[in-house]
Amino acid sequence: MKRDKVWLGVSGLVINEQGEWLVVTKQYGGMKGMWSFPAGFVDNGETADQAVLREIYEETGIEGSVEGVIGLRTGVIKDIISDNMIIFLVRPAHTTIRQDIPDEEIEDVQFRSTYDLYQDDHCSPMVRALIDEMQAPLRLKSMTSPGPQFNYTHYHLFL
Protein backbone atom coordinates (compact mmCIF):
# COMPACT_ATOMS: atom_id res chain seq x y z
CA MET A 1 0.00 0.00 0.00
CA LYS A 2 1.42 3.35 -1.02
CA ARG A 3 -0.45 5.94 0.97
CA ASP A 4 1.06 9.30 0.28
CA LYS A 5 4.41 9.10 2.04
CA VAL A 6 3.89 5.92 4.09
CA TRP A 7 4.40 2.62 2.27
CA LEU A 8 3.55 -0.87 3.51
CA GLY A 9 5.01 -3.80 1.65
CA VAL A 10 5.16 -7.52 2.30
CA SER A 11 7.64 -10.23 1.47
CA GLY A 12 7.48 -13.98 1.95
CA LEU A 13 10.03 -16.68 2.67
CA VAL A 14 8.87 -20.04 1.28
CA ILE A 15 10.98 -23.11 2.12
CA ASN A 16 10.63 -26.41 0.25
CA GLU A 17 11.09 -29.93 1.70
CA GLN A 18 14.80 -29.86 0.82
CA GLY A 19 15.26 -26.68 2.88
CA GLU A 20 15.75 -24.50 -0.20
CA TRP A 21 14.41 -20.95 -0.22
CA LEU A 22 12.14 -19.54 -2.93
CA VAL A 23 13.74 -16.45 -4.49
CA VAL A 24 13.06 -14.24 -7.48
CA THR A 25 14.99 -11.70 -9.51
CA LYS A 26 13.12 -8.55 -10.49
CA GLN A 27 13.51 -6.74 -13.79
CA TYR A 28 13.27 -3.22 -12.37
CA GLY A 29 14.12 -0.94 -9.45
CA GLY A 30 16.79 -1.18 -6.81
CA MET A 31 16.47 -4.98 -6.61
CA LYS A 32 16.93 -5.50 -10.37
CA GLY A 33 18.95 -8.67 -10.93
CA MET A 34 19.21 -9.44 -7.20
CA TRP A 35 17.90 -12.61 -5.57
CA SER A 36 15.15 -11.59 -3.16
CA PHE A 37 11.89 -12.94 -1.82
CA PRO A 38 8.60 -12.44 -3.67
CA ALA A 39 7.28 -9.08 -2.50
CA GLY A 40 4.92 -6.22 -3.16
CA PHE A 41 2.59 -3.67 -1.64
CA VAL A 42 -0.53 -4.32 0.43
CA ASP A 43 -3.66 -3.46 -1.56
CA ASN A 44 -6.70 -1.64 -0.18
CA GLY A 45 -9.06 -4.03 1.58
CA GLU A 46 -6.51 -6.73 2.42
CA THR A 47 -4.43 -7.57 5.46
CA ALA A 48 -0.67 -7.84 5.18
CA ASP A 49 -0.81 -11.64 5.53
CA GLN A 50 -3.37 -11.84 2.72
CA ALA A 51 -1.17 -9.59 0.57
CA VAL A 52 1.93 -11.76 0.94
CA LEU A 53 0.04 -14.86 -0.22
CA ARG A 54 -1.27 -12.92 -3.24
CA GLU A 55 2.20 -11.60 -4.12
CA ILE A 56 3.84 -15.03 -3.86
CA TYR A 57 1.15 -16.52 -6.09
CA GLU A 58 1.33 -13.68 -8.65
CA GLU A 59 5.12 -13.85 -8.92
CA THR A 60 5.66 -17.62 -8.70
CA GLY A 61 2.36 -19.53 -8.94
CA ILE A 62 2.96 -21.06 -5.51
CA GLU A 63 0.10 -21.08 -3.02
CA GLY A 64 0.57 -21.43 0.70
CA SER A 65 -0.41 -20.43 4.20
CA VAL A 66 1.20 -17.92 6.54
CA GLU A 67 3.19 -19.48 9.37
CA GLY A 68 4.19 -16.24 11.02
CA VAL A 69 6.18 -13.02 10.89
CA ILE A 70 9.97 -13.36 10.73
CA GLY A 71 11.02 -9.78 10.21
CA LEU A 72 10.22 -6.13 9.75
CA ARG A 73 12.21 -3.87 7.49
CA THR A 74 11.65 -0.17 7.99
CA GLY A 75 13.44 2.83 6.56
CA VAL A 76 13.04 6.38 5.35
CA ILE A 77 13.76 7.30 1.73
CA LYS A 78 15.31 10.75 1.15
CA ASP A 79 14.02 11.96 4.55
CA ILE A 80 10.47 11.88 3.15
CA ILE A 81 8.98 8.42 2.55
CA SER A 82 8.45 5.90 5.35
CA ASP A 83 9.09 2.55 3.61
CA ASN A 84 8.04 -0.50 5.65
CA MET A 85 7.99 -4.21 4.84
CA ILE A 86 6.72 -7.14 6.90
CA ILE A 87 8.52 -10.40 6.14
CA PHE A 88 6.44 -13.56 6.54
CA LEU A 89 7.29 -17.23 6.71
CA VAL A 90 4.94 -19.10 4.36
CA ARG A 91 4.29 -22.85 4.22
CA PRO A 92 3.83 -23.91 0.58
CA ALA A 93 0.82 -25.99 -0.47
CA HIS A 94 3.01 -27.18 -3.37
CA THR A 95 6.41 -26.23 -4.78
CA THR A 96 5.71 -26.18 -8.52
CA ILE A 97 6.84 -22.88 -9.98
CA ARG A 98 4.54 -21.81 -12.78
CA GLN A 99 6.07 -21.50 -16.23
CA ASP A 100 4.29 -18.28 -17.22
CA ILE A 101 5.89 -15.93 -14.69
CA PRO A 102 5.03 -12.25 -15.26
CA ASP A 103 8.01 -11.37 -17.47
CA GLU A 104 7.44 -7.61 -17.25
CA GLU A 105 8.21 -7.86 -13.53
CA ILE A 106 10.06 -11.08 -12.72
CA GLU A 107 13.18 -12.29 -14.50
CA ASP A 108 13.68 -15.64 -12.76
CA VAL A 109 12.19 -17.80 -9.98
CA GLN A 110 14.11 -20.60 -8.24
CA PHE A 111 14.38 -22.62 -5.07
CA ARG A 112 18.00 -22.27 -3.93
CA SER A 113 20.00 -23.56 -0.99
CA THR A 114 20.93 -21.01 1.64
CA TYR A 115 24.58 -21.89 1.07
CA ASP A 116 24.38 -21.09 -2.66
CA LEU A 117 22.41 -17.92 -2.02
CA TYR A 118 24.88 -16.68 0.57
CA GLN A 119 27.80 -17.21 -1.81
CA ASP A 120 26.03 -15.47 -4.72
CA ASP A 121 27.11 -11.85 -5.30
CA HIS A 122 23.56 -11.12 -6.46
CA CYS A 123 21.93 -12.15 -3.17
CA SER A 124 20.08 -9.25 -1.55
CA PRO A 125 21.36 -8.00 1.82
CA MET A 126 17.98 -8.79 3.44
CA VAL A 127 18.13 -12.44 2.32
CA ARG A 128 21.71 -12.69 3.59
CA ALA A 129 20.68 -11.17 6.94
CA LEU A 130 17.86 -13.69 7.33
CA ILE A 131 20.22 -16.57 6.55
CA ASP A 132 22.44 -15.29 9.39
CA GLU A 133 19.86 -14.22 11.95
CA MET A 134 16.41 -15.78 11.43
CA GLN A 135 14.63 -16.73 14.64
CA ALA A 136 11.30 -18.44 15.35
CA PRO A 137 8.40 -16.56 13.74
CA LEU A 138 5.72 -14.56 15.50
CA ARG A 139 2.63 -16.72 14.94
CA LEU A 140 -0.99 -15.88 14.25
CA LYS A 141 -2.60 -16.09 17.69
CA SER A 142 -5.98 -14.51 17.26
CA MET A 143 -8.35 -13.39 14.58
CA THR A 144 -10.77 -11.85 17.07
CA SER A 145 -11.61 -8.19 16.66
CA PRO A 146 -10.77 -5.92 19.61
CA GLY A 147 -14.36 -4.67 19.55
CA PRO A 148 -17.18 -3.57 17.27
CA GLN A 149 -16.36 0.11 17.81
CA PHE A 150 -13.33 -0.30 15.49
CA ASN A 151 -15.34 -1.73 12.54
CA TYR A 152 -12.65 -4.18 11.45
CA THR A 153 -13.63 -6.51 8.61
CA HIS A 154 -10.37 -8.47 9.09
CA TYR A 155 -8.18 -8.46 12.21
CA HIS A 156 -5.06 -10.65 12.65
CA LEU A 157 -2.72 -10.62 15.65
CA PHE A 158 0.79 -12.12 15.49
CA LEU A 159 2.60 -12.82 18.80
Image (cartoon, helix red, strand yellow):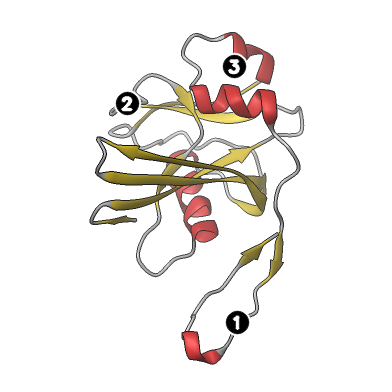
Single out the residue that lies furthest toward the bottom: 148
Q: Position of residue 122 (x, y in %)?
A: 46, 14
* Distance from the alpha carbon under mark 1 to that under mark 3: 41 Å
Decide which of tag 2 and tag 1 comes sooner along the chain.
2
Q: Residue at x 64, y 45 (%)?
A: 89
Q: Nearer the viewer, mark 1 or mark 3?
A: 1
Quadrant for the C terminus, please.
bottom right
Mark 1 secondary-structure assignment:
loop
Q: Position of residue 71 (x, y in %)?
A: 59, 42
Confirm whether residue 8 shows in the render: yes
Q: Position of residue 158 (x, y in %)?
A: 66, 60
| Callouts 1 and 3 close, C-beta under 8 Å | no
Mark 3 secondary-structure assignment:
helix
Q: Residue at x 24, y 44 (%)?
A: 80
Q: Find residue 20 and report its image quarter.
A: top right
Q: Residue at x 60, y 81 (%)?
A: 145
Which of the two residues, 98 or 123, is positioned nearer the viewer here? 123
Q: How many other residues sit within 10 Å of disc 3, few (<14), some (14-19) or many (≥20)?
A: many
The circle drawn on residue 117 is 3
Mark 2 secondary-structure assignment:
loop
In the picture, measured across the screen, residue 92 lies left or right of residue 28, that is: right
- Residue type beneath disc 1: Pro
Q: Which residue is mark 1?
A: 146
